[in-house]
Amino acid sequence: MIHHLSMPTCLAQASATTDVATAVASVAGVALLAAVLTSFAKFTMIAAAVAHGLGAARLPSAWLGASWALLLTAVVMWPVWDACSVEWTKAGLQAAAEPLGTFLVANSDPESLASFERVRDTIAARAGTEATRSDSVRGVLTVAGPAFMVTEFTEAFMSALFVLIPFLVIDLVVANLLLAAGASSLSPAVVALPLKILAFVMMDGWRLIVQGVVLGYAY
C-alpha cells in the first residue's frame, strides 16, 4: 500500500530535518572553536608525542589522551570561563568575550598578534570597514584566536621535542647495544619500550609535563 503524504506533512518533516542538521553543525562548530581557543589542542598534541616517543600508539590510547587533555583544559580555562559567565550575566555576549580575549592575548606571541593585526587591518581597509578590537567577539575570532592557536601549536611542538629527544636517545643506545651484542634478531623497539617507560616514570614525566604546561599560562 502506498501512503501519500500531504504537503504540510512533507514541509514539517523537511523543517525538522533542517533543524537537526543546523543543530549538529552548530555543536560541531562550537566544539572546533573550543578546541583551538583553549589549551585543549596543546595538551592533545603533547599526549600524542608521548605515545609516539614510547613507540606504543595505545600507551596512552587516543581517547585516554583526549580525556587527559580535556581535564587539564578545564583546570587551565576554569577561571576564564567563570569570568565569561559573570560578564555574560551582566551584559551579554560582547562583554563575555572580553575575558576570553584578554586570556588569548596574554598567552599569544607578540609577533603573531602583530601579524594577525596587520592582516585584520589590511582586510578591513580593502573592505572599507572599521577594524575591531582584539577582545571583541570579532576580534577574538580574527586576531586573538588565530594568534593564540599559532602560539599553542608552536609551544606544543617545542614540548614534543623535549619529550621525544630522551626517547630517541634510548632508542639509539638500545639499537647499538643489540648490534654490538650480535642480537640483531631482537626488535630494538620491543627492548626499548620497558626502558623508556621506566625512565619516564623515574623522571616523574607526567607531573613535570603538567606543571610545566599548566603553570605556563598567564591570566
Image (cartoon, rainbow, N blue to C red):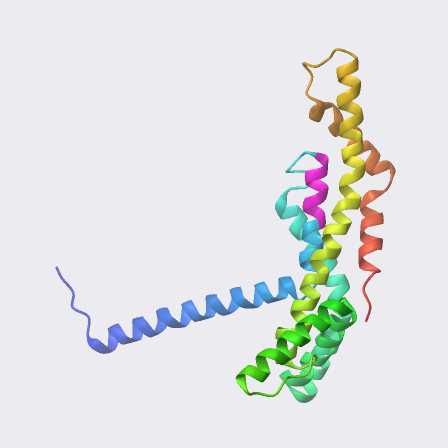
Residue name at image x 69 percent, y 68 percent: 147
The magenta stretch is: 46-54
In the image, residue 47 sits, relative to residue 24, either above or below, namely: above
In the image, residue 165 sits, relative to residue 9, either above or below, namely: above
Relative side of 207 to 160, left or right: right
Image quadrant holding the C terminus, namely bottom right
In which quarter of the view is residue 57 placed?
Answer: top right
Q: Nearer the viewer, residue 217 or 105?
A: 105
- Coordinates of residue 49 in the picture (x, y in percent): 70, 44
In which quarter of the view is residue 35 placed?
Answer: bottom right
| Residue that protrudes farthest toward the left in the picture | 1
| Residue that protrudes farthest toward the top in the picture | 182
- Coordinates of residue 50 in the picture (x, y in percent): 72, 42
Q: Nearer the viewer, residue 95 or 129?
A: 129
Q: Nearer the viewer, residue 95 or 149?
A: 149
In the image, residue 86 sits, relative to residue 175, either above or below, namely: below
